[in-house]
Amino acid sequence: MSEKRGRVFSGARPTGRQHLGNYLGAIRNYVALQDDYDCIYCIVDLHALTTLQDTDRLREWTYEMALDWLAAGIDPARGTILFIQSHVPQVTELHTIFSMVTPLGWLTRLPTFKEKVRQQPDNVNYGLVGYPVLMAADIALYKADTVPVGVDQAPHLEFTREIVRRFNHIFGEVLVEPQARHTEFPKVLGIDGEQKMSKSLDNHIEIAATPEEITQRVMMMTTDPQRRYRHDPGRPEVCNVFSLHQFFSPAEVAQIERDCRTADIGCVDCKRLFARNLADHFAPLRERRAALAQEPDHVWDILADGARRASVIASEVIAQVKAAVGLP
Protein backbone atom coordinates (compact mmCIF):
# COMPACT_ATOMS: atom_id res chain seq x y z
CA MET A 1 0.00 0.00 0.00
CA SER A 2 1.09 3.56 -0.66
CA GLU A 3 2.84 5.51 2.08
CA LYS A 4 1.86 8.85 0.55
CA ARG A 5 -1.58 8.98 2.18
CA GLY A 6 -2.96 8.24 5.61
CA ARG A 7 -4.35 4.81 6.38
CA VAL A 8 -8.01 4.29 7.25
CA PHE A 9 -9.36 1.28 9.11
CA SER A 10 -12.96 0.48 9.86
CA GLY A 11 -14.88 -2.67 10.61
CA ALA A 12 -18.47 -3.77 11.05
CA ARG A 13 -20.15 -6.88 12.38
CA PRO A 14 -21.59 -9.17 9.69
CA THR A 15 -25.29 -8.42 9.67
CA GLY A 16 -26.16 -9.52 6.14
CA ARG A 17 -27.93 -7.20 3.72
CA GLN A 18 -27.26 -3.57 4.58
CA HIS A 19 -29.87 -0.89 5.24
CA LEU A 20 -30.14 2.88 4.86
CA GLY A 21 -28.64 3.49 8.29
CA ASN A 22 -25.56 1.46 7.36
CA TYR A 23 -25.28 3.24 4.04
CA LEU A 24 -25.70 6.84 5.21
CA GLY A 25 -23.77 6.36 8.44
CA ALA A 26 -20.82 4.37 7.12
CA ILE A 27 -20.75 2.80 3.65
CA ARG A 28 -20.92 5.95 1.52
CA ASN A 29 -18.16 7.41 3.69
CA TYR A 30 -16.06 4.26 3.21
CA VAL A 31 -16.39 4.71 -0.55
CA ALA A 32 -15.50 8.41 -0.49
CA LEU A 33 -12.42 7.89 1.70
CA GLN A 34 -10.84 5.77 -1.03
CA ASP A 35 -10.08 9.00 -2.92
CA ASP A 36 -7.68 10.27 -0.27
CA TYR A 37 -6.58 7.35 1.90
CA ASP A 38 -5.29 3.82 1.78
CA CYS A 39 -8.32 2.00 3.12
CA ILE A 40 -8.66 -1.25 5.05
CA TYR A 41 -12.21 -2.44 5.67
CA CYS A 42 -12.98 -5.50 7.76
CA ILE A 43 -16.01 -7.69 8.38
CA VAL A 44 -15.51 -8.40 12.08
CA ASP A 45 -16.92 -11.90 12.50
CA LEU A 46 -15.16 -12.59 15.82
CA HIS A 47 -17.02 -9.68 17.39
CA ALA A 48 -20.28 -11.28 16.31
CA LEU A 49 -19.60 -14.31 18.51
CA THR A 50 -20.17 -12.32 21.70
CA THR A 51 -23.93 -12.80 21.39
CA LEU A 52 -23.84 -16.52 20.46
CA GLN A 53 -26.97 -16.07 18.36
CA ASP A 54 -27.41 -17.38 14.80
CA THR A 55 -23.71 -18.17 14.43
CA ASP A 56 -24.69 -20.76 11.82
CA ARG A 57 -25.61 -17.83 9.57
CA LEU A 58 -22.29 -15.97 9.86
CA ARG A 59 -21.06 -17.17 6.47
CA GLU A 60 -24.30 -16.14 4.77
CA TRP A 61 -24.36 -12.73 6.46
CA THR A 62 -20.69 -12.12 5.69
CA TYR A 63 -21.26 -12.85 2.02
CA GLU A 64 -24.37 -10.65 1.79
CA MET A 65 -22.57 -7.79 3.55
CA ALA A 66 -19.58 -8.08 1.22
CA LEU A 67 -21.92 -8.01 -1.79
CA ASP A 68 -23.49 -4.75 -0.63
CA TRP A 69 -20.13 -3.13 0.19
CA LEU A 70 -18.64 -4.06 -3.16
CA ALA A 71 -21.76 -3.02 -5.06
CA ALA A 72 -21.75 0.33 -3.23
CA GLY A 73 -18.25 1.08 -4.51
CA ILE A 74 -15.66 -0.38 -2.13
CA ASP A 75 -13.08 -1.25 -4.75
CA PRO A 76 -10.03 -3.51 -4.26
CA ALA A 77 -8.85 -2.45 -7.72
CA ARG A 78 -8.16 0.98 -6.18
CA GLY A 79 -5.94 -0.56 -3.52
CA THR A 80 -8.61 -0.99 -0.86
CA ILE A 81 -8.26 -4.07 1.33
CA LEU A 82 -11.52 -5.85 2.17
CA PHE A 83 -11.26 -8.96 4.35
CA ILE A 84 -12.76 -11.05 7.15
CA GLN A 85 -11.39 -10.45 10.64
CA SER A 86 -10.84 -14.08 11.64
CA HIS A 87 -8.84 -14.75 8.48
CA VAL A 88 -5.95 -12.68 9.88
CA PRO A 89 -5.30 -14.43 13.21
CA GLN A 90 -2.61 -11.96 14.31
CA VAL A 91 -5.47 -9.84 15.63
CA THR A 92 -6.13 -12.36 18.39
CA GLU A 93 -2.44 -12.26 19.36
CA LEU A 94 -2.51 -8.49 19.68
CA HIS A 95 -5.81 -8.71 21.54
CA THR A 96 -4.17 -11.01 24.12
CA ILE A 97 -1.17 -8.70 24.53
CA PHE A 98 -3.43 -5.64 24.83
CA SER A 99 -5.50 -7.42 27.49
CA MET A 100 -2.40 -7.53 29.70
CA VAL A 101 -2.10 -3.73 29.76
CA THR A 102 -5.81 -2.88 29.98
CA PRO A 103 -7.18 -2.17 33.50
CA LEU A 104 -10.42 -4.04 34.10
CA GLY A 105 -12.03 -0.87 35.44
CA TRP A 106 -11.64 0.79 32.05
CA LEU A 107 -13.80 -1.91 30.50
CA THR A 108 -16.57 -2.16 33.06
CA ARG A 109 -17.10 1.60 33.12
CA LEU A 110 -17.82 1.83 29.39
CA PRO A 111 -21.48 2.77 28.72
CA THR A 112 -21.62 0.29 25.86
CA PHE A 113 -20.66 -2.59 28.15
CA LYS A 114 -23.40 -1.67 30.61
CA GLU A 115 -25.89 -1.54 27.75
CA LYS A 116 -24.83 -4.98 26.50
CA VAL A 117 -25.25 -6.41 30.00
CA ARG A 118 -28.83 -5.11 30.02
CA GLN A 119 -29.45 -6.63 26.59
CA GLN A 120 -28.09 -10.09 27.41
CA PRO A 121 -27.96 -10.51 31.22
CA ASP A 122 -27.71 -14.29 30.91
CA ASN A 123 -24.63 -14.18 28.69
CA VAL A 124 -22.14 -11.68 30.11
CA ASN A 125 -19.10 -13.46 28.68
CA TYR A 126 -15.42 -12.52 28.66
CA GLY A 127 -15.66 -11.62 24.97
CA LEU A 128 -18.36 -9.08 25.79
CA VAL A 129 -16.17 -7.45 28.42
CA GLY A 130 -13.11 -7.54 26.17
CA TYR A 131 -14.94 -6.37 23.04
CA PRO A 132 -13.26 -2.92 23.08
CA VAL A 133 -9.83 -4.51 23.50
CA LEU A 134 -10.35 -6.62 20.38
CA MET A 135 -11.57 -3.54 18.56
CA ALA A 136 -8.40 -1.70 19.60
CA ALA A 137 -6.37 -4.62 18.24
CA ASP A 138 -8.28 -4.44 14.95
CA ILE A 139 -7.20 -0.84 14.48
CA ALA A 140 -3.69 -0.90 15.94
CA LEU A 141 -2.68 -4.06 14.03
CA TYR A 142 -2.69 -2.07 10.78
CA LYS A 143 -1.25 1.15 12.21
CA ALA A 144 -4.30 3.02 10.99
CA ASP A 145 -4.05 6.76 11.68
CA THR A 146 -7.66 7.53 10.76
CA VAL A 147 -10.89 5.83 11.83
CA PRO A 148 -14.29 7.00 10.53
CA VAL A 149 -16.77 6.97 13.41
CA GLY A 150 -20.20 8.26 14.29
CA VAL A 151 -20.77 10.25 17.45
CA ASP A 152 -22.07 7.16 19.28
CA GLN A 153 -18.83 5.29 18.53
CA ALA A 154 -16.49 8.03 19.75
CA PRO A 155 -16.04 6.56 23.27
CA HIS A 156 -14.80 3.27 21.81
CA LEU A 157 -12.25 4.99 19.61
CA GLU A 158 -11.03 7.07 22.55
CA PHE A 159 -10.66 3.78 24.44
CA THR A 160 -8.48 2.48 21.60
CA ARG A 161 -6.36 5.61 21.79
CA GLU A 162 -5.91 5.10 25.55
CA ILE A 163 -4.75 1.51 25.08
CA VAL A 164 -2.28 2.53 22.38
CA ARG A 165 -0.95 5.37 24.53
CA ARG A 166 -0.55 3.02 27.50
CA PHE A 167 1.21 0.38 25.40
CA ASN A 168 3.57 2.94 23.87
CA HIS A 169 4.31 4.43 27.29
CA ILE A 170 5.29 1.03 28.70
CA PHE A 171 7.05 -0.51 25.71
CA GLY A 172 8.11 2.39 23.48
CA GLU A 173 6.61 4.17 20.48
CA VAL A 174 5.62 1.15 18.43
CA LEU A 175 1.96 1.72 17.54
CA VAL A 176 0.06 4.56 15.92
CA GLU A 177 -2.52 6.48 17.93
CA PRO A 178 -5.55 6.76 15.62
CA GLN A 179 -7.53 9.93 15.06
CA ALA A 180 -11.29 10.09 14.60
CA ARG A 181 -12.86 11.23 11.37
CA HIS A 182 -16.47 11.94 12.27
CA THR A 183 -19.19 11.09 9.82
CA GLU A 184 -21.43 13.97 8.84
CA PHE A 185 -24.79 12.24 8.63
CA PRO A 186 -26.88 12.28 11.83
CA LYS A 187 -28.51 9.19 13.30
CA VAL A 188 -30.84 7.55 10.81
CA LEU A 189 -34.22 6.72 12.31
CA GLY A 190 -36.12 3.62 11.29
CA ILE A 191 -39.51 3.51 9.62
CA ASP A 192 -41.10 3.93 13.06
CA GLY A 193 -39.56 7.42 13.22
CA GLU A 194 -38.51 6.84 16.83
CA GLN A 195 -35.63 4.41 17.15
CA LYS A 196 -32.38 4.07 15.24
CA MET A 197 -32.78 2.02 12.06
CA SER A 198 -32.03 -1.60 12.88
CA LYS A 199 -32.65 -5.04 11.42
CA SER A 200 -33.28 -6.45 14.90
CA LEU A 201 -36.15 -3.99 15.32
CA ASP A 202 -37.42 -4.63 11.77
CA ASN A 203 -37.64 -0.90 11.15
CA HIS A 204 -35.14 -0.82 8.30
CA ILE A 205 -35.06 -0.40 4.51
CA GLU A 206 -32.45 -2.48 2.68
CA ILE A 207 -30.31 -0.66 0.13
CA ALA A 208 -30.53 -3.61 -2.28
CA ALA A 209 -34.32 -3.95 -1.96
CA THR A 210 -36.40 -4.01 -5.14
CA PRO A 211 -38.43 -0.90 -6.03
CA GLU A 212 -41.54 -2.76 -4.93
CA GLU A 213 -40.01 -3.69 -1.58
CA ILE A 214 -38.79 -0.12 -1.09
CA THR A 215 -42.26 1.26 -1.77
CA GLN A 216 -43.84 -1.18 0.66
CA ARG A 217 -41.45 -0.20 3.46
CA VAL A 218 -41.60 3.54 2.76
CA MET A 219 -45.39 3.54 2.87
CA MET A 220 -45.11 2.21 6.45
CA MET A 221 -42.96 5.16 7.55
CA THR A 222 -44.17 7.48 10.28
CA THR A 223 -44.54 11.14 9.29
CA ASP A 224 -45.66 14.21 11.27
CA PRO A 225 -47.85 12.73 14.05
CA GLN A 226 -49.91 15.93 14.30
CA ARG A 227 -50.85 15.86 10.62
CA ARG A 228 -53.97 13.74 10.89
CA TYR A 229 -55.79 14.85 7.73
CA ARG A 230 -54.75 15.62 4.16
CA HIS A 231 -55.61 19.33 4.49
CA ASP A 232 -53.61 19.78 7.73
CA PRO A 233 -50.37 21.79 7.24
CA GLY A 234 -47.29 19.67 7.91
CA ARG A 235 -44.09 20.24 9.89
CA PRO A 236 -41.18 18.97 7.77
CA GLU A 237 -38.70 19.57 10.58
CA VAL A 238 -40.21 16.71 12.63
CA CYS A 239 -40.88 14.34 9.71
CA ASN A 240 -38.53 11.40 9.22
CA VAL A 241 -39.48 11.07 5.55
CA PHE A 242 -38.55 14.70 4.92
CA SER A 243 -35.20 14.28 6.68
CA LEU A 244 -34.34 11.58 4.14
CA HIS A 245 -35.74 13.61 1.24
CA GLN A 246 -32.96 16.09 1.99
CA PHE A 247 -30.40 13.50 0.92
CA PHE A 248 -32.26 11.53 -1.75
CA SER A 249 -34.35 14.34 -3.32
CA PRO A 250 -31.98 17.35 -3.42
CA ALA A 251 -33.54 18.92 -6.52
CA GLU A 252 -37.06 18.76 -5.10
CA VAL A 253 -36.59 19.18 -1.37
CA ALA A 254 -37.30 22.93 -1.26
CA GLN A 255 -40.58 22.46 -3.11
CA ILE A 256 -41.51 19.48 -0.94
CA GLU A 257 -40.97 21.58 2.18
CA ARG A 258 -43.17 24.41 0.90
CA ASP A 259 -45.92 22.05 -0.27
CA CYS A 260 -45.88 20.18 3.04
CA ARG A 261 -46.25 23.36 5.10
CA THR A 262 -49.15 24.57 2.96
CA ALA A 263 -50.80 21.14 2.67
CA ASP A 264 -50.37 21.18 -1.12
CA ILE A 265 -48.91 17.69 -0.84
CA GLY A 266 -50.13 14.90 1.42
CA CYS A 267 -48.02 12.38 3.30
CA VAL A 268 -48.96 9.56 0.93
CA ASP A 269 -47.76 11.48 -2.14
CA CYS A 270 -44.66 12.59 -0.25
CA LYS A 271 -43.83 8.97 0.56
CA ARG A 272 -44.42 7.83 -3.02
CA LEU A 273 -42.03 10.49 -4.27
CA PHE A 274 -39.43 9.44 -1.72
CA ALA A 275 -39.82 5.75 -2.60
CA ARG A 276 -39.30 6.54 -6.29
CA ASN A 277 -36.19 8.63 -5.66
CA LEU A 278 -34.79 6.06 -3.25
CA ALA A 279 -35.28 3.23 -5.75
CA ASP A 280 -33.68 5.34 -8.51
CA HIS A 281 -30.71 6.22 -6.30
CA PHE A 282 -29.88 2.57 -5.62
CA ALA A 283 -30.64 1.26 -9.13
CA PRO A 284 -26.93 1.15 -10.11
CA LEU A 285 -26.09 -0.62 -6.85
CA ARG A 286 -28.78 -3.24 -7.46
CA GLU A 287 -27.40 -3.84 -10.96
CA ARG A 288 -23.80 -4.21 -9.76
CA ARG A 289 -24.92 -6.45 -6.90
CA ALA A 290 -26.86 -8.75 -9.22
CA ALA A 291 -23.77 -9.10 -11.43
CA LEU A 292 -21.54 -9.90 -8.45
CA ALA A 293 -24.06 -12.44 -7.14
CA GLN A 294 -23.66 -14.38 -10.39
CA GLU A 295 -20.07 -15.17 -9.36
CA PRO A 296 -20.04 -15.94 -5.62
CA ASP A 297 -16.59 -17.54 -5.86
CA HIS A 298 -15.24 -14.21 -7.12
CA VAL A 299 -16.59 -12.44 -4.01
CA TRP A 300 -14.91 -15.01 -1.73
CA ASP A 301 -11.69 -14.64 -3.76
CA ILE A 302 -11.76 -10.87 -3.15
CA LEU A 303 -12.09 -11.48 0.59
CA ALA A 304 -9.31 -14.09 0.55
CA ASP A 305 -6.98 -11.78 -1.38
CA GLY A 306 -7.81 -9.01 1.09
CA ALA A 307 -6.83 -11.30 3.96
CA ARG A 308 -3.52 -12.11 2.28
CA ARG A 309 -2.74 -8.42 1.81
CA ALA A 310 -3.83 -7.56 5.34
CA SER A 311 -1.66 -10.39 6.70
CA VAL A 312 1.45 -8.81 5.20
CA ILE A 313 0.89 -5.68 7.31
CA ALA A 314 -0.30 -7.61 10.35
CA SER A 315 2.74 -9.93 10.39
CA GLU A 316 5.14 -7.01 10.37
CA VAL A 317 3.31 -5.12 13.12
CA ILE A 318 2.84 -8.11 15.43
CA ALA A 319 6.56 -8.87 15.09
CA GLN A 320 7.35 -5.32 16.20
CA VAL A 321 4.92 -5.62 19.12
CA LYS A 322 6.40 -8.92 20.29
CA ALA A 323 9.90 -7.53 20.09
CA ALA A 324 8.89 -4.45 22.07
CA VAL A 325 7.20 -6.56 24.75
CA GLY A 326 10.20 -8.86 24.97
CA LEU A 327 8.62 -12.09 23.79
CA PRO A 328 11.33 -14.48 22.51
Image (spheres, rainbow, N blue to C red):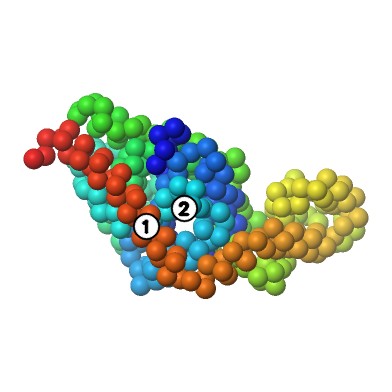
Q: Pointer 2 and pointer 1: residues touching (CB < 8 Å)?
A: yes
**Looking at numbered disc 2 in the image, what kind of residue is underneath it?**
Pro
Residue 305, which numbered label? 1
Q: Does label 2 or label 1 sit earlier along the sequence?
A: 2
Q: Residue at x 70, y 63 (%)?
A: 279
User: Who's the residue at 24% across and 37% down the image?
Assistant: 103
Residue 54 occupies which quadrant of the picture? bottom left
Query: Going by the image, does 18 lie left or right of 3?
Result: right
Residue that mark 2 sits on: 76
For the residues marked 2 and 1, what is the alpha-carbon distance in whole angstroms?
A: 9 Å
Q: Does residue 120 lie above or below 7 as drawn?
A: below
Q: Residue at image x 29%, y 33%?
A: 175
Horizontally, residue 242 falls left or right of residue 54, namely right
Percent from the top left, x then y, of residue 73? 56, 54
Residue at 33 percent across and 65 percent down: it is 52
Q: In this orientation, which residue lies closer to the viewer: 42 or 304?
A: 304
Q: Position of residue 69 (x, y in %)?
A: 51, 57
